[in-house]
Amino acid sequence: MVKKTDINVTIGKNIRHRRKLANLSQEFVAKRMGYSYQQQQKYETGSSSLTCEKAIDLAKLLGCAVEHLLGDATRQASPLKEPEWNAFKVTELMQHFSRIKSRTARTKVTQLVKTVADVVAVKGKL
């Protein structure tokens, strides 16, 4: 069973609100969605999480956009932290570096990057 979270509770309240606006019972929605009345209750109380596919289908049934079901939940989610080594940035750096034809220039760029890395390692910032 999924732990009851603030995000699930927010989505559940939005589902209940939209269901009532559509004047539909939990039993009707559950039957049309292909799951039990109890499962609908769990979604509406935030005790269970919806899959993306179920959220889309439920929004269609309730006659609203998925965004109406998610509501404030998207603002409650923690932003993902960028990994220390972003593979795309490393690739981009290598692409630019490989365009430098001068061996001397490459050596100087390498020395510059090493110096910056050393300063950041000691001071924690530039």
Image (cartoon, grey):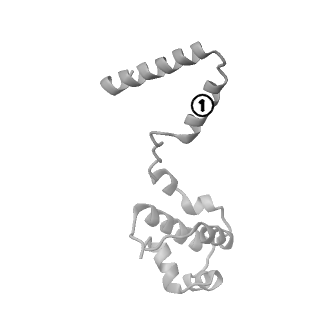
Q: Is residue 17 above or below residue 84?
A: below
Residue where numbered disc 1 is placed:
94
Left/right of residue 124 with respect to residue 116 in the rendered view: left
Instruction: Name the residue at 39% across, 69% down.
Output: 4
Instruction: Name the residue at 38% across, 70% down.
Output: 3
Number of numbered labels in the structure image = 1
Q: Residue furthest left?
A: 122
> Residue 21: image x %, image y %?
60, 70
Q: Quadrant of residue 94?
A: top right
Left/right of residue 38 with respect to residue 21 in the rendered view: left
Left/right of residue 42 with respect to residue 118 in the rendered view: right
Observer-nearest of 98 and 81: 98
Q: Which three-letter amino acid code belongs to the residue tagged 1?
A: Met
Instruction: Name the residue at 48% across, 79% down.
Output: 41
Q: Is residue 41 above or below residue 50?
A: below
Helix, strand or loop at mark 1: helix
Q: Is residue 81 above or below residue 17?
A: above
Observer-nearest of 24 and 90: 90
**Other residues around mark 1 within 10 Å, as few (<14) / some (14–19) / many (≥20):** few
Observer-nearest of 32 and 14: 32
Q: Is residue 97 above or below residue 64?
A: above
> Residue 25: image x %, image y %?
57, 82
Q: Quadrant of residue 122?
A: top left
> Residue 6: image x %, image y %?
40, 61
